[in-house]
Amino acid sequence: MARKTGSHSEITGPKIQAAALRLFSQHGYAAVSMRQIAADVGVQAGAIYNYVPDKQTLLSELLVSHMEALLASLDPGPDDPIQALEAFVRHHIAYHLPRPDDVFISYMELRNLTPDNHATVSGLRQTYEATLESILAEGVAAGQFHVPDAKIASYAIIALLTGVVNWFKPDGRLSAEGLADEYWQMVAQLVGLQVANGGDSPAG
């Protein structure tokens, strides 16, 4: 059966993706059925296939759209490696903090993709990681950063930055801006920089 077209499809399709994102994050991909997603959206179980062919496609679309949006939002940054690294750190945190469900399934459900879909998502992630690796390599070449392996350092920094979504609370001690200041300090030290602490005061 062909997918529906027009405004109804434009509304229902995003609702299905939003419901799938929420349910996959709460219960895990394997535990969620298409029937549950349909019920959450408020459409008949069979009607959901007018908008998406299967659950695997839903998962793949969610992970691909997350990475494509992240890459599209990433500014090339300044030419100076130190300024570029700081911009990367602050952008990564600002982008990921409001998207904990996207981050969770991007890491926890990658294993549930088919080989072809896995390769697509992994390729996008490698493109993002390569951006940071390039910044680090340029800083090492300029004598600004001191890391033994830029690729390994890029993995470590991304893991460090992404982990904030697991514990950060908007009404907690630090504001999002203050958190970015703290993490920039840590990343700067990780690559061998000494940066004066000019961050925001803790909030609340």
Image (cartoon, rainbow, N blue to C red):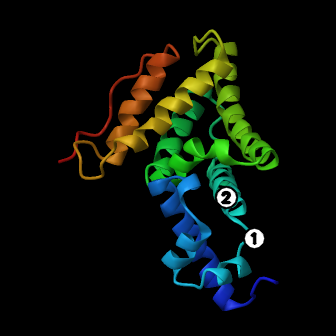
Residue 202 drawn above or below residue 189: below
Residue 153: image location, x then y, percent: 59, 20
- Out of 131 and 105, give the one closest to the viewer: 105
Q: Name which quarter of the figure residue 166 lies in.
A: top left
Task: Identify residue for label 1.
Answer: 53
The amino acid at mark 1 is Pro
Residue 81 drawn above or below residue 199: above
The amino acid at mark 2 is Ser
Image quarter hosting the N terminus? bottom right
Find numbered disc 2 in the image and state the secondary structure of the residue it sits on.
helix
What residue do we see at 70% from left, 14% from top? 141
Residue 155 drawn above or below residue 141: below
Task: Identify residue for label 2.
Answer: 65
Q: Residues within 10 Å of mark 1 (few under 14, many from 20)?
A: few
In the rendered image, is residue 99 in sight?
A: no
Residue 149: image location, x then y, percent: 66, 13
